[in-house]
């Protein structure tokens, strides 16, 4: 009973508690000052390095390979005009000798015909019968036939000498050997590929570009009957090689004439000069064929625009702006890209 009375007294005598309203805590926001300026637009793509010129090296004469150059190895470089391999020239040397002998014989026959024609003209003049009734009387057809035989024999000499020269298979340009198909001792025939080579003066990268990105880059256009006057945009190529990122600079030289029906992509071709040269960076590797690269294409310049992070966009075309009263309000914007 005493405890109950004490408890009732404590409840009756307790002080009144003042109710306090919690002050609202303002939310934290990230803010950035916006300035308008001219911004160069960048279009990104990717592709694989390929040679601008690639050829199947084939002999123009048949024979057995008797010698190959040290540059006739997969991955080796060679210069324009360098002899990569040589075919046995014996038969072609004999053909040259025989052709030159035919020229000597036909020239002898021509000299005889010229002498006989001169005799025929003198005899006809001595007869005093006027002009000859037929050309055969003055041996003119025989003389023309002898001259034609000499021309044919001389042409055979040129052909034989060219065939002899063709026993040395030379590089048509400075390049690199991708694949070889023959070696010393093998027999090659006319037109059979002996190697696959490509030029090293330029390298190309085929870059796919989606249709919605074409508005930001000025591609060179080609029209029928006209040469491309517009210079293509500059391109920076990046590749990860041996754990490091290296850069090369190129230029878009053309666009392919078709749109890919599957992906609806337009393909631009960027060209890099001297891809196997050392360049300014001695540690930079060559821009080898088959290397996968990322490309940044220098697009057009947008004037009086602001660059904002994607997270600042609310909905499709609104951003939050801080007013002079430190309040937030929505602002409609025109989205360029």
Image (spheres, helix red, strand yellow):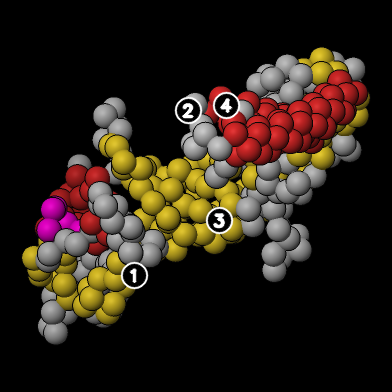
Q: Earlier in the sequence, mark 3 or mark 2?
A: 2
Discs 4, 2 touching: Cβ within 8 Å: yes
> Which residue in the protein does label 4 denote?
137
Per the rendering, the mark at residue 133 is 2
Quarter residue 146 falls in: top right
Q: CA distance from mark 4 to mark 1?
A: 89 Å
Q: Is residue 308 rendered to the left or right of residue 14? A: right
| Residue 204, visible in the rendered structure | yes
Is residue 335 or residue 316 the one in the foreground?
335
> Which residue in the protein does label 3 denote?
272
Residue visible at 16% across and 61% down?
Answer: 335
**Secondary structure of residue under mark 3:** strand
Q: CA distance from mark 3 to mark 2?
A: 74 Å
Nearest-to-viewer mark from 3 and 2: 2
Percent of width and height locating residue 155: 68, 33
Q: Earlier in the sequence, mark 4 or mark 1?
A: 1
């Amino acid at each position: 009973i005493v405890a109950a009375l004490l408890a009732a007294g404590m409840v009756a005598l307790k002080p009144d508690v003042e109710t306090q309203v919690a002050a609202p805590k303002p939310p934290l926001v990230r803010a950035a000052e916006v300035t308008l300026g001219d911004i160069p637009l960048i279009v990104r793509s990717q592709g694989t390095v390929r040679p601008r010129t690639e050829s199947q090296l084939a002999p123009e004469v048949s024979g057995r390979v008797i010698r190959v150059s040290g540059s006739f190895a997969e991955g080796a470089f060679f210069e324009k005009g360098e002899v990569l391999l040589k075919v046995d020239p014996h038969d072609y040397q004999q053909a040259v000798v025989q052709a030159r002998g035919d020229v000597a014989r036909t020239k002898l026959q021509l000299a005889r015909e010229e002498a006989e024609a001169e005799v025929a003209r003198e005899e006809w003049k001595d007869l005093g019968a006027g002009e000859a009734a037929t050309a055969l009387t003055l041996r003119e057809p025989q003389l023309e036939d002898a001259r034609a035989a000499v021309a044919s024999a001389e042409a055979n000499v040129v052909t034989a000498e060219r065939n002899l020269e063709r026993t040395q298979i030379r590089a048509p340009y400075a390049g690199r050997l991708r694949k070889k198909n023959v070696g010393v001792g093998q027999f090659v025939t006319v037109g059979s590929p002996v190697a696959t080579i490509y030029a090293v003066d330029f390298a190309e990268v085929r870059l796919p570009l989606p249709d919605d990105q074409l508005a930001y880059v000025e591609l060179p256009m080609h029209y029928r009957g006209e040469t491309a006057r517009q210079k293509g945009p500059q391109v920076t190529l990046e590749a990860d090689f041996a754990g490091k990122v290296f850069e090369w600079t190129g230029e878009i030289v053309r666009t392919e004439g078709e749109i890919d029906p599957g992906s609806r992509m337009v393909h631009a071709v960027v060209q890099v000069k001297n891809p196997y040269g050392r360049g300014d960076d001695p540690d930079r590797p060559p821009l080898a064929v088959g290397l996968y690269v990322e490309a940044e294409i220098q697009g057009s310049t947008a004037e009086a625009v602001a660059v904002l992070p994607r997270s600042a966009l609310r909905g499709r075309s609104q951003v939050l702006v801080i007013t002079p009263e430190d309040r937030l309000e929505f602002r409609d914007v025109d989205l360029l890209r």
